Image (cartoon, rainbow, N blue to C red):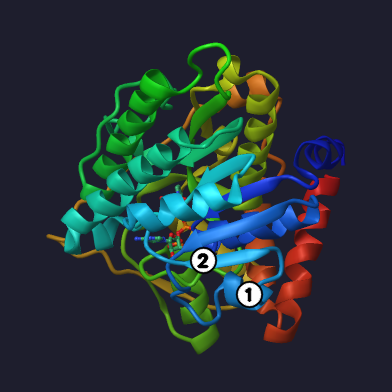
Amino acid sequence: MEDMVNLVETYKGKRIFLTGHTGFKGAWLSAMLHQLGARVKGYSLPPEHEQGLFMVLGGEGVEESVLADIRDRQRLEQEILAFAPDFIFHLAAQPLVRRSYEIPAETFDVNVTGTANVLEAATRLKKDCVMVMITTDKVYENKEKAELLYKEGDVLGGYDPYSASKACAELVVSSFRNSFFLSAAGRPVKSLASTRAGNVIGGGDWSRDRIIPDIVRSLMAGRTIDVRNPAAVRPWQHVLEPLTGYLVLGAKLQESPKVYSNAFNFGPLPEGHLPVSEVVKTAIDVWGNGDWRDASTPGAPHEAGLLKLDIQKAQEQLSWRPKLDAREAIRWTLEWYKQPLSEQRRFTFEQINHYFSL
Ligand SMILES: NC(=O)c1ccc[n+]([C@@H]2O[C@H](COP(=O)([O-])OP(=O)(O)OC[C@H]3O[C@@H](n4cnc5c(N)ncnc54)[C@H](O)[C@@H]3O)[C@@H](O)[C@H]2O)c1
C-alpha cells in the first residue's frame, strides 16, 4: 500500500505520454496509471490481438489513443508537443527475438530510430519532463555463464537482431542524455533513464512465440504444449513487478533528475531464474492438467541459453523489490486467463489493487 500512496502523489493528475499502449505491457501500465489518477495519451500501432489486454480494457485508462507509427517522426513530434507530457514512458517496439530474424532491418528501424524519434521530439518540449525508456535484459553481451548475473555497468552486446537493436537503443539514450538533457541552468529539466527487465508474464498477452501465450493456447485447446527451448534459463517475473519499478523510477527521476538518470535492471530474486521447462511444469500444475514435450529443433535461430539479472541497484537505490515469486507469478497469470472474457477487465484492476496492497 505504501507504494500506491507514493505513486498517487507523483502521478495523480499528471500527463503521461505512453508509447506501446496497445501492447501487453503498455496496456497493463495504462491500467495502473489509471488507478493512480494519471491522464494518459497513448501512441502505438493498432492492437494486434483481439483478445489482448488493450481490447479487454476497452480504452479505459487512456484519455487519448493515437494509432500511428513511431517511425513517423513528424506525427510523433506533433502528438508529443501538443500533449506537453510531464512523463514519457517509451515501450513501443518490435519486441520478439524470433520475429527479428524475419525482419531484422525493420526491427532496428522501430527499436533504434523509434527511440531517437521520441527523444528528438522531447528536446523540443518547453517544460520539465521525466523520460523512462524501456529496453530489455537482452542488451548485455551474453557470456552464457551460469554464475553470472548481469549488472547495469556490464558490456552491452546482442547476438540476434532484437537484442542488438535494444543495445543500440541504449546508446541512443545515453547519447541524447549527454548531448541534450540535464543541461544548462534555466532550461527545462529533462531526466532520462533506461530500464532492463527480464521475461515478463501476465494476463492478456497473446504474442506469437512467447512461452505463456503458447502454453495457454495449448492448454485451452487440450493440446500437448510444444516447448522450443526447455533448457533456456530466464529471469521470470509478473508484469506488475517491472511496471511498478518503472513507476517508482519515474517518481525518483522527478525528485532527483541527476541521481537517477541512468540504467536500471528489474528482475526477480535469484530463485526466479528458472529454465523454461520449470515454468511449463508449474503452469500445468497450476492449471490442473496438460502435458508438454521438447520441441527443440536443431538449426533453429539462435536464442540465448542463460540469462540472469542482478537487481541490487534497483533494490538499494529505488527501494523497489519483487513481491511475487515465480510460482505466484505463474499462478496470477493463469488465473487471469481462466477468467471469462466478461470478467477479465474487472480482474485486471483487481490484480493491480491486490499487487499494490502487498
Ligand atoms: N514482454 C517481455 O517479456 C519483455 C521483456 C523485456 C522487455 N520488453 C520490452 O517491453 C516493451 C513492451 O513489450 P510488450 O511485451 O508489451 O510487446 P507487445 O508486442 O505486446 O507491444 C508492443 C507495442 O509496441 C507498439 N509498436 C510496435 N511497433 C510500432 C511502431 N512501428 N510504431 C508504433 N508503435 C509500435 C505496438 O503497437 C504495441 O503497442 C518493448 O519495448 C519490449 O522490448 C518486453
| In the image, farthest residue toward the left | 299
Q: Quadrant of ligand 1?
A: bottom left
Q: Is residue 182 above or below residue 55?
A: above
Q: Residues within 10 Å of mark 2 (few under 14, many from 20)?
A: some
Residue 228: give x, y in percent of width and height. 31, 64
Left or right, 64 with respect to 92, comes to right
Residue 184: give x, y in percent of width and height. 50, 12
Q: Quadrant of residue 70?
A: bottom left
Q: Amino acid at mark 2?
A: Val
Q: Say which element carries label 2.
A: strand
Left or right, 16 with respect to 1, comes to left
| In the image, farthest residue toward the bottom | 221
Residue 307 in view (yes/no):
no
Q: Amino acid at mark 1?
A: Tyr
Residue under the image location 33 percent in, 25 percent down: 175
Label 1 near ligand 1 (CB < 8 Å): no
Q: Is residue 277 above or below residue 12?
A: below
Q: Quadrant of the N terminus?
A: top right
Q: Residues within 10 Å of mark 1 (few under 14, many from 20)?
A: some
Q: Is residue 40 above or below residue 245?
A: below
Residue 22: give x, y in percent of width and height. 52, 66
Please give the residue where the numbered disc 1 appears in the rendered image.
337
Depth check: 281 or 32 in front? Answer: 32
Please give the residue where the numbered disc 2 appears in the rendered image.
66
